[in-house]
Image (spheres, rainbow, N blue to C red):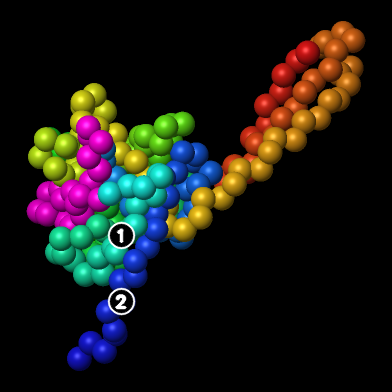
Amino acid sequence: INTTPTPVPQLTEYVLITDERALITGEKYIIVGVNDSIYKALGKQNDNNRSAVAVTPSNDTITVTPANLPGLDAVYELTLGQDNGNWTFYSAADSGYLYAASSSKNYLRTQAQNDANGQWTIEIAGDGKATITAQGNNSRKSLRYNSGNSLFACYAASSDMLQAYLYKAGDIPTPPAPTYYTISVADGIANGTVTVSDTVAEAGALITVTAT
């Protein structure tokens, strides 16, 4: 007899992320597609794709109660993880990881044991559009929103399906202000200085050097 209680879903506020520094291991996210001001979030697992559930944003936030069981007509929350330097999307409600499942079909499925097809790179544009790309051998690996059929699936990189957005549960961390240094240069630049700005990223400090 399984005596493990099913987690009780809680009303949760999710905030649009517009910076990759808001991608944090262990935090919760939802995936959202937008077309003509109509917002839909990633929903239940179908055979070969995920449904899209209507949501209503307010000032870049979406407040919903995420699903706690598979097969519900509800928004599904994903826990962000890391594997081999890439990101993973784990659905606790489905007990599995999202993955790009085919090279010939636009399949987005869930697997209990993750592999490279369920390891993703994520690039966030300034307007929040997310380029989400699986790193396995399956070539239809770009997670997109299909507004015409109201679903999320994986497509070829050349597809005209819409890029999605990521919304994070809870607060968005405030990026630290850049710190600037001026140092003397003995070689290479006569009578010059070098300005070094460091931007703290999750993977470490990114240093940019500019000669002046």
Residue 192 position in % (x across, y down) = 85, 12
Q: Which residue is mark 2?
A: 8
Q: CA distance from mark 2 to mark 1?
A: 14 Å
**Residue range of the region highlighted in magenta in the rendering:** 35-55
Secondary structure character of the magenta stretch overall: strand
93 displayed left or right of 168: left
| Amino acid type, residue under disc 2 in the picture | Val
Residue 190 position in % (x across, y down) = 87, 8
State how many labels appear.
2
In the picture, residue 121 is in which quadrant? Answer: top left
In the picture, residue 141 is in which quadrant? Answer: top left
Q: Quadrant of the N terminus?
A: bottom left
- Residues tagged 2 and 1 counted as in contact (Cβ below 8 A): no
Residue 151 position in % (x across, y down) = 16, 44
Which residue corresponds to the image point at 10% horizontal and 39% vertical from the top-left? Answer: 149
Q: Which residue is mark 1?
A: 64
Residue 109: in magenta span: no
2 displayed left or right of 124: left
Q: Which secondary structure lies at badge 1?
A: strand
Q: Residues within 10 Å of mark 2 (few under 14, many from 20)?
A: few
- Looking at the picture, does residue 32 appear above or below residue 9? above
